[in-house]
Image: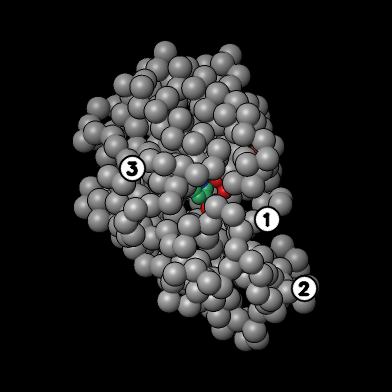
């Protein structure tokens, strides 16, 4: 049991980290963001202090922990583009597994009491059973997923209580806080659909012959505010001494590509221009979480993950960015 000190939020300038930093700060915890801005945005760092640098800079991380009285870490920092990982697997091994291993070593030496880690449903690869529960075997089908399995292992090996939160599809935004999704390149469906509406350039539906109800891929979309609240609950659990583990973070409800495009069209009041294209390599037909464990162990309930709410928040954020 530990806790009460400051929380180091690695990658707190990206997409998913800042809402969690906001939620932590709202719960009364001092926050220190550590980010190298390789893909982050300075304007997303609005809660707590900022330390600019690399999670694998041992001297910097050690000094940050000591100076700020850090007792726990939320670890978001990573490279997270599946396509890039396929093109350059070594980069993902070095960057994700390698740097997380260094961070884990410093955390253990400095007596950190809890780590909440951003894992992913990509650790399961092509699951045998959907909805996917945490006992599904880990058979990642791309180097990104493999690097996240290796990160989980490196973190669990420290003996520090670790919560590996395996997110399904992070989506939505917190427009009221100026937070949302701006990846470069953007590969996520909702921002791409909003871009298609803005530019008139049609989005390509990648595969319409999957064994799913409408032939397009089905995913489990979870709002970043719901992800944020799960991080606070996971940290509470670890600091209470109730033990770590792996938890899926999804709603348990799937939406197909066509469902999402319809929702974007409904929210915008006009249809998304779209064309049909072939399947993309490595896309499993359906990835939907069994979310029983997270509901039971963390007492977590999704509040904002309704698809129309996700889309309207993402659209409001985009409007702000392009105003
Ligand atoms: N977005 C999703 O749908 C999704 C789904 C599952 C898991 N995840 C995981 O969630 C985490 C956050 O994803 P995101 O979408 O916010 O990505 P992101 O690229 O927006 O954010 C990553 C942040 O980490 C920082 N960073 C990267 N490497 C760093 C390093 N070595 N040192 C310091 N800072 C570094 C970047 O500058 C950026 O601010 C990642 O670990 C990702 O694997 C995301």
Q: Residue 18 in the image: state x and y as whole percent.
A: 54, 47
Q: Residue at x 58, y 76 (%)?
A: 261
Q: In the depicted view, which residue is nearer to us: 215 or 45?
A: 215
Secondary structure of the residue carrying numbered label 3: loop
Disc ID at residue 137: 3
The residue furthest bottom is 269
CA gap between label 2 and label 1 equals 15 Å
According to the picture, the residue beneath numbered tag 2 turns out to be 201
Contact flag, marks 2 and 3 (Cβ < 8 Å): no
- Above or below, comparing residue 37 to residue 81 in the picture: above
According to the picture, the residue beneath numbered tag 1 turns out to be 186
Secondary structure of the residue carrying numbered label 1: loop
- In the displayed structure, does residue 274 sit left or right of residue 252? right
Disc ID at residue 43: none
Q: Residue at x 65, y 86 (%)?
A: 270
- In the displayed structure, does residue 213 sit left or right of residue 171? left
Secondary structure of the residue carrying numbered label 2: loop
Q: How is the image coloured?
A: one colour
Q: Residue at x 68, y 77 (%)?
A: 274
Which badge, 2 or 3, is on the more N-terminal residue?
Answer: 3
Q: Point out the quarter of the image occupied by ligand 1.
A: top right
Instruction: Nearest to the eye among marks 1 and 3: give it.
Output: 3
For label 2, count other residues whose C-alpha is less than 10 Å away and answer few (under 14), some (14-19) or many (20+).
some
Q: In the depicted view, which residue is nearer to us: 272 or 36?
A: 272
Q: Residue 192 in the image: state x and y as whole percent.
A: 66, 65
Contact flag, marks 1 and 3 (Cβ < 8 Å): no
């Amino acid at each position: 049991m530990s806790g009460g000190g400051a929380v180091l939020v690695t990658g707190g300038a990206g997409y998913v980290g800042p809402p969690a930093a906001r939620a932590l700060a709202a719960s009364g915890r001092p926050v220190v963001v550590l980010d190298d801005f390789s893909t982050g945005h300075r304007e997303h760092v609005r809660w707590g202090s900022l330390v600019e640098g690399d999670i694998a800079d041992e001297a910097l991380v050690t000094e940050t922990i000591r100076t700020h009285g850090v007792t726990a870490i939320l670890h978001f920092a990573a490279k997270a583009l599946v396509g890039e990982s396929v093109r350059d697997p070594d980069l993902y091994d070095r960057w994700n597994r390698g740097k997380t291993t260094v961070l884990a070593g410093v955390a253990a030496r400095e007596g950190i009491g809890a780590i909440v880690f951003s894992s992913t449903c990509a650790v399961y690869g092509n699951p045998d059973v959907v909805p996917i529960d945490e006992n599904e075997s880990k058979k990642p089908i791309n180097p990104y997923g493999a690097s996240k399995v290796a990160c989980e292992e490196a973190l669990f090996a420290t003996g520090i209580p670790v919560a590996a939160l395996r997110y399904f599809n992070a989506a939505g935004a917190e427009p009221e806080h100026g937070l949302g999704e701006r990846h470069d390149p953007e590969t996520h469906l909702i921002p791409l659909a909003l871009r298609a509406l803005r530019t008139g350039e049609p989005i390509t539906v990648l595969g319409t012959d999957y064994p799913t109800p409408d032939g397009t891929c089905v995913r489990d979309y979870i709002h970043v505010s719901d992800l944020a609240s799960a991080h606070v609950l996971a940290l509470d659990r670890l600091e209470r001494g109730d033990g770590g583990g792996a938890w899926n973070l999804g709603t348990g409800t799937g939406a197909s590509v066509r469902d999402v495009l319809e929702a974007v069209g409904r929210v915008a009041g006009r249809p998304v221009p779209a064309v049909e294209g072939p399947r993309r390599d490595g896309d499993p037909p359906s990835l939907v979480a069994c979310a029983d464990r997270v509901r039971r162990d963390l007492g977590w309930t999704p509040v904002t993950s309704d698809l129309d709410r996700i889309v309207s928040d993402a659209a409001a954020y985009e409007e702000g960015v392009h105003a």
